[in-house]
Image (cartoon, rainbow, N blue to C red):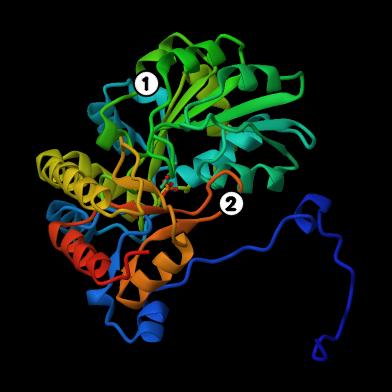
């Protein structure tokens, strides 16, 4: 820091100082260089992306758009009309964000004052517990049962007068199971704001969106990142009562969803038959991947309602399994935390990806 002319103790907010370090995901190019394997030969089964990419219609729409020099529509009129056609909810019950991640952040900022509590049904997607403390929220982890279903009595018991919000991913990431509708209804009856994150809805076919007209305290959240192959463009949306959305409209940055992202999401909705074919291919591949994982003696794959399979590992190290597959260019996620002991998560890929994985697993020592 010798080059600094002025050294001042900038008064960083306490909540930020106390946060853990940010651990970035390594770019593919860097990994490719380290492994000596071209990017095109890497089998990326670590982030639940759609390996078929976005539809050709989406690519064409992005290329054809001639108004990138104009700011995006802050009211997302065309986009919300397309979303409305897609999900069957009226446009004034919809709001889009730069991925679900932005919407998670907005929802926390909507209700959390410093010191307020945010319930987290762990193990689950890390973004909820990452973003709540930025706002001074206190994350209260409520462990799921051993089969990763919600522990309803424990969740109900955890609600106190400073509890503002509960996040439930359904299907859950990384365990791939759905939340029981009756459990969510019981939680909604307490009046607590419940955000049901349906990032994998298109792979499960199950939704609680029909309940938004009954419960003002329900928010259903979706994304184009997984099914539509648009993770890189960042489009998510929420379905909720206009009485709740009106406050989010005041808070959200006017230009949160870029012109390219709005064009892409609209084009995706206009090209559902194509995308549905890739979803069907992934659902068929999920069965083949499940068969493969079940045939490996040390893997214990759990049933999946999403485009990935969670797999506890027995009698060998999940970390070394991840490492050995990575050396062969196959990328998967590994977990070893108190609630996720020695496990891996494998995204569903194309048939040739399953074959690469089959060959790699066959070449490993049995344990
Ligand atoms: C991948 C994922 C998302 C997607 O977030 P985006 O910001 O929309 O890319 C959201 N929730 C869960 C549970 C996920 O696994």
Q: Is residue 184 above or below residue 255?
A: above
Classify 10 Å Cα crowding around label 2: few (below 14), some (14-19), many (20 and above). few
Q: Residue at x 42, y 80 (%)?
A: 30
Classify 10 Å Cα crowding around label 1: few (below 14), some (14-19), many (20 and above). some
Q: Secondary structure at mark 2?
A: loop
Residue 254 in view in this figure? no
Q: Is residue 1 above or below residue 217?
A: below
Please give left or right for residue 351 compared with residue 150 in the image. left
Give the mark nearest the N terminus, 1 or 2. 1
Q: Residue at x 41, y 31 (%)?
A: 170
Q: Which numbered disc covers residue 2?
A: none
Q: Residue at x 35, y 40 (%)?
A: 302
Image coordinates of residue 71 in percent, x first then y, are 41, 53
Residue 100 in view in this figure? yes
Residue 304 vs residue 96, the one in the foreground: 304
Please give left or right for residue 313 compared with residue 115 in the image. left
Image coordinates of residue 298 in percent, x first then y, are 36, 54
Residue 42 vs residue 145, the one in the foreground: 145
Please give left or right for residue 143 compared with residue 147 in the image. right
Image coordinates of residue 21 in percent, x first then y, are 68, 63
Q: Which residue is mark 1?
A: 209
In space, the residues marked 1 and 2 are separated at their CA atoms by 32 Å
Q: Are marks 1 and 2 in contact (CB under 8 Å)?
A: no
Q: Which numbered disc covers residue 337?
A: 2
Q: Is residue 122 above or below residue 52?
A: above
Q: Quadrant of the N terminus?
A: bottom right
In front: label 1 or label 2: 2
Image coordinates of residue 22 in percent, x first then y, are 63, 63
């Amino acid at each position: 820091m010798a080059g600094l002319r002025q050294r001042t103790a900038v008064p960083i907010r306490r909540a930020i100082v106390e946060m853990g370090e940010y651990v970035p995901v390594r770019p593919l190019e860097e990994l490719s260089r380290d492994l000596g394997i071209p990017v095109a030969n890497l089998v990326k089964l670590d982030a639940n992306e759609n390996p078929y990419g976005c539809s050709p219609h989406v690519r064409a729409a992005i290329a054809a758009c001639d108004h990138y020099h104009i700011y995006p529509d802050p009211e997302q009129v065309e986009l919300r009309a397309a979303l409305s056609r897609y999900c069957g909810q009226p446009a004034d019950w919809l709001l889009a964000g730069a991925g679900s991640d932005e919407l998670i952040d907005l929802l926390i900022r909507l209700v959390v004052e410093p010191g307020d509590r945010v319930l987290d049904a762990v193990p689950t997607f890390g973004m909820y517990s990452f973003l709540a403390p930025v706002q001074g929220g206190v994350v209260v982890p409520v462990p799921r049962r051993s089969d990763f279903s919600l522990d309803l009595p424990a969740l109900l018991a955890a609600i106190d007068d400073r509890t503002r919000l509960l996040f439930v991913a359904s299907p859950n990431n990384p365990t791939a199971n759905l939340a029981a509708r009756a459990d969510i209804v019981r939680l909604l009856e307490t009046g607590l704001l419940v955000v049901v994150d349906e990032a994998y809805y298109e792979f499960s076919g199950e939704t609680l969106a029909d309940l938004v007209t009954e419960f003002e305290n329900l928010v259903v959240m979706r994304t184009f990142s997984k099914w539509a192959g648009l993770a890189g463009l960042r489009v998510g949306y929420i379905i909720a009562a206009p009485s709740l959305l009106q406050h989010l409209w005041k808070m959200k940055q006017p230009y949160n969803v870029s012109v390219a992202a709005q064009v892409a999401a609209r084009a995706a909705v206009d090209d559902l038959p194509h995308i549905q074919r890739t979803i069907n291919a992934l659902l068929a591949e999920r069965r083949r991947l499940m068969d493969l994982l079940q045939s490996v003696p040390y893997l214990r794959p759990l049933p999946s309602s999403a485009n990935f399979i969670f797999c506890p590992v027995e009698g060998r190290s999940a970390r070394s399994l991840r490492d050995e597959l990575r050396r062969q260019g196959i990328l998967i996620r590994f977990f070893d935390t108190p609630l996720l002991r020695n496990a891996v998560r494998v995204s569903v890929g194309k048939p040739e990806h399953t074959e690469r994985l089959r060959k790699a697993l066959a070449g490993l020592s049995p344990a």
